[in-house]
Image: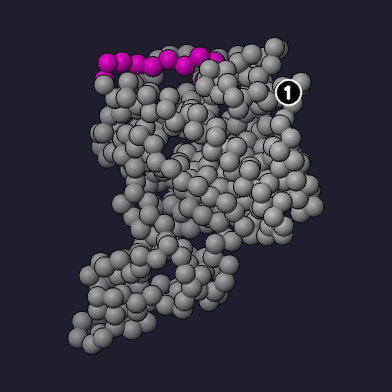
Amino acid sequence: MADRSAFEMLLPAEAAARLGSGPIDARAYHDPDWFELEREAVFKRSWIHIGHVCEVPDIGSFIRRELEFARASLLIVRGKDGEIRAFHNVCTHRGTQLTDAESGKGNSFSCRYHMWTFGSDGALLSAPDFEKFGLEKKDCALKQVQLETCGGLIFVNLAKAPKQSLREFLGPIADELDALPIARAIEFHEYTFEIAANWKIYVDNFQENYHLRFIHTRTGAATISDENPLGYPTHYGFSGPHRGQTLWRNPNPPPTPTVQLMAMTKAMQAGARDGFPTQKTDFKLFPAMFVLGLGGYAFTHTIYPLTAGKTRGVIRYYWPSKADSASTRFAREYAMAVVRDIHAEDRGVVEAGQKGLGRGVLEHIHFQEHEVLCRHLNEQVRACVDAYLAERV
């Protein structure tokens, strides 16, 4: 359920009337040239989620992130002053990648090739025979990337001078993220997977419930009922380039099997003990991130484009405390397993959509009023591409 203070919430017919009902260019879902425009105009200019502050808890803690859409490898480091910064994982001598480690801790990074050594603030500390280069150390620091945080989540922007700060980009959603339990998380469960589909086909699958009754016959009972057989949301919301929805809940869901009920109850109890809010939150952040907060836990789902027809998804459940018992750990792992079950049901049909659209048979695709969030995403992407092309003229 989207928090109504962060979005302008509309009934489905109102949302559809505002965004229109025209056909969508199908090339946007498979054309390599269009994908290249999206890489430059959208992903290399937007704030992209890459991690959480709990991953770099101490001075010298670092994580490495590969962003294929930007052909970039980034080091995210907590410096001696406590600030978190992002740098290109590239030695400024001859471009060698500084580390292959996914994470670690240390006061410096040394290039294995010629032992140029950099501090946690990116400054060049030392280099053998440096005086022979005729350079100043201050001019050889690691190349920095814009990094900001909100609600404990780490975002980067590959633009040299982003047009908006992260909080300006998020608008009223920023305050909502600050209030979520994710901001206080110290532990998370994660799984990643790659799917043979364009990133928008993948994102769109999680922005509409039109498919629930047909694809999620086993896992969708909580959102389907006689009153709403397709499980459509009751409202759709918009805040700048971002979206949200108010989900329908079955007032009389089928009984939950005993083991699953025990797991969910345990997770809710642990969440209440740790001060998790009970409100439900459903944010779909531009360009490709979902934040879902439920009573007892919260998770993020971040989508990274790899090619025009391949995408990576990273799903995380966040917790504000360490699992202090086997039953709590079981409850948390069960929560993750439920989401994996749902995504497993989606995978085949999403890839089938890519295969069909990739053949180039269709010139257009069509969205109905309950696919209005898909339409909104396409419009926002196209607006970014149009602005980028106008700057190049």
Q: Is residue 162 left or right of residue 16?
A: left
| Residue 278 drawn at (x, y percent) | 76, 41
Query: Residue shown at 60%/31% (left/top)?
Result: 244
Please indicate, yes or no, whether residue 4 appears anywhere in the rendered image: no
Which amino acid, mark 1? Pro
Asked if residue 251 is positioned above or below residue 304 in the image, the reply reads above
The secondary element bearing badge 1 is classed as loop
Query: Residue shown at 62%/19% (left/top)?
Result: 232
| Residue 361 location, quadrant | top left
| Residue 323 drawn at (x, y percent) | 68, 57
Frontmost residue, 369 versus 253: 253
Query: Residue shown at 45%/73% (left/top)?
Result: 121
Q: Is residue 355 left or right of residue 121?
A: left
Frontmost residue, 147 versus 208: 208
Residue 19: say if magenta: no
Query: Residue shown at 25%/67% (left/top)?
Result: 95
Residue 365: say if magenta: yes
The magenta span reads: 360-372
- Residue under label 1, please give it: 253
